[in-house]
Amino acid sequence: MDDVRDVRIVEDVETLKALSDPLRLSILQAMSGAPGDRSWTAKELARELKEPQTKLYRHLKHLEEAGLILVAETRVVSGIVEQRYTAAQRRIQLSRGFLASTAAGASDERDAALELVNSALTSFERELAGALRSGRVRLDDADERRRPMVMIADFRLAADRAEAYRARLRQLMDELNAEPDDPDGVPVHVMLAMYRPDE
């Protein structure tokens, strides 16, 4: 579709709130992860996500109102109006200063930012668990390139080393965000996070 953007930069709280739900993130991931310009009905998404179709309608409406998905086609099937949806962007990225400005804002803005982090974690876990259960991902895959890499750890590092790791992670994020989609490529799911609390 011509209306689909490559990257959507999130700079407003309403879009952040629309993203702050694990099921809505899963809907967007399904739409964005499909090869080509595929569009989806609520029924197809329900089957893909293993969720009741009736549960998806309000989430689809919320995503459409936020401009995160588009109605690609409307048709009448057996006397019922059926809509096909597509993601309005291939990737979503928060503007660099947005979370900082949101965190400094009102408590509902901070809550929305925290809920987005929680939704992203939940959605990632749901996708990985589904891939493991279906056998699409194996922890003991003979091909090491296909094995998941997971690291959850706490470290105490010198301040300059902590900043060096942060800079390297930022560089990796920027490289991944700049990577063009390859229609013949393999799907890759990535979650990178790092924070440094005050003592």
Image (tube, rainbow, N blue to C red):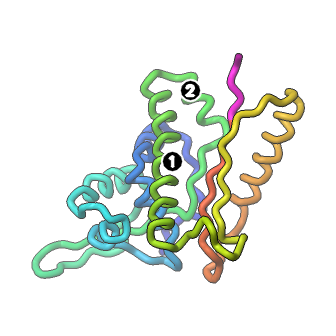
Residue 148 x/y as whole percent: 64, 62
Q: Is residue 84 visible?
A: no
Residue 25 in the figure: left or right of residue 156: left
The amino acid type of the residue labelled 1 equals: Ala
The amino acid type of the residue labelled 2 equals: Ala
Residue 157 in the figure: left or right of residue 93: right
Residue at point 65% right, 35% down?
97
Which residue bears the numbered disc 1? 120
Closer to the camera in the image, 23 or 18: 23
* Residue 92 sits in quarter: bottom right
Residue 51 in the figure: left or right of residue 197: left
Q: Is residue 66 visible?
A: yes
Residue 87 in the figure: left or right of residue 79: right
Q: CA distance from mark 2 to mark 1?
A: 17 Å
Report the magenta residues as a range.
195-199
Chief SS of the magenta region: loop
The label nearer to you, 2 versus 1, is 1
Residue reaching furthest left?
79
Which residue bears the numbered disc 2? 103
Residue 43 x/y as whole percent: 27, 71
Residue at point 86% right, 39% down?
164
Say few, some or many: other residues with alpha carbon within 10 Å of mark 2 (under 14 / 14 to 19 / 20 or more). Answer: some
Tell me which numbered mark, 2 or 1, is placed earlier along the sequence.
Answer: 2
Q: Is residue 105 magenta?
A: no
Q: Quadrant of the C terminus?
A: top right
SS state under label 1: helix
